[in-house]
Image: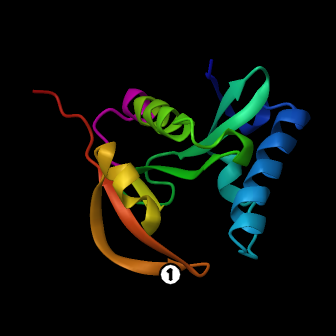
């Protein structure tokens, strides 16, 4: 069963932080052949959402506070599922949890993601809508997507 932990950087053990950075480098640098500084200053201010099965890191996303990178938006980024655990819908479970957390902490704030274009349908199924045109980031096609915030009736 997938369980989640949500932590700020100072709350993470060195072993947990190593696991996060290792998984992110394996996916975003090695698998996707992107040479860029994967670990960045955003890690200092974001929430780190980790999904575990039997103490094994299965999936990860970071939740970036409202207005930190994108004025008027909270953001979800660095979404990944570890290779050995793909094909079991853990990415969907992770995103649903990340959306829930964003809506809990920033209830009326829309959620921003910079989605790789091959995942457009995945994110649309979660309620995200395309915002603007496709663009290249680190040699990979992306598109901005938005999930509108909840508004009181």
- Determine if residue 73 is in view: no
The spot of residue 114 in percent (x, y) is 46, 62
Please provide the residue range marked out in magenta: 102-111
Name the image quarter holding residue 117. bottom left
64 relative to 115 in the view: left or right: right
82 relative to 68 in the view: left or right: right
Q: Nearer the viewer, residue 22 or 83?
A: 83
78 relative to 71 in the view: left or right: right
User: Relative to residue 77, is residue 105 depicted above or below?
Assistant: above
Residue occupying the point 77% across, 44% down: 20
The spot of residue 138 in percent (x, y) is 61, 78
25 relative to 66 in the view: left or right: right
User: Relative to residue 65, is residue 114 depicted above or below?
Assistant: below
Q: Is residue 50 magenta?
A: no
User: Relative to residue 66, is residue 92 depicted above or below?
Assistant: above
Residue occupying the point 48% across, 30% down: 97
**Residue pointed to by mark 1:** 136
Residue occupying the point 77% across, 20% down: 54
The spot of residue 132 in percent (x, y) is 29, 73
The spot of residue 69 in percent (x, y) is 50, 60
Q: Nearer the viewer, residue 122 or 28?
A: 122
Name the image quarter holding residue 37. bottom right
Q: Residues within 10 Å of mark 1 (few under 14, many from 20)?
A: few
Q: Helix, strand, or loop for circle 1? A: strand
Which residue is at the far front? 87
- Determine if residue 145 is in view: yes
Residue occupying the point 37% across, 60% down: 120
Q: Nearer the viewer, residue 72 or 111?
A: 111
């Amino acid at each position: 069963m997938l369980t989640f932990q949500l932590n700020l950087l100072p709350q993470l053990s060195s072993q947990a932080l190593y696991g996060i950075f290792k998984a992110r480098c394996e996916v975003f640098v090695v698998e996707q052949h992107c040479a860029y500084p994967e670990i960045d200053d955003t890690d200092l201010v974001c929430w780190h959402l980790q999904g575990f099965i039997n103490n094994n890191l299965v999936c990860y996303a970071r939740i970036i506070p409202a207005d930190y990178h994108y004025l008027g938006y909270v953001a979800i980024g660095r979404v990944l599922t570890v290779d050995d655990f793909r094909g079991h819908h853990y990415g969907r479970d992770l995103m649903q949890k990340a959306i829930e957390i964003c809506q809990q902490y920033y209830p009326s704030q829309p959620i921003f993601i910079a989605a790789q274009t091959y995942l457009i349908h995945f994110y649309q199924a979660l309620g995200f809508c395309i915002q603007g045109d496709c663009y290249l980031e680190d040699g990979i096609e992306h598109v901005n997507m938005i999930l509108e915030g909840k508004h009181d009736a």
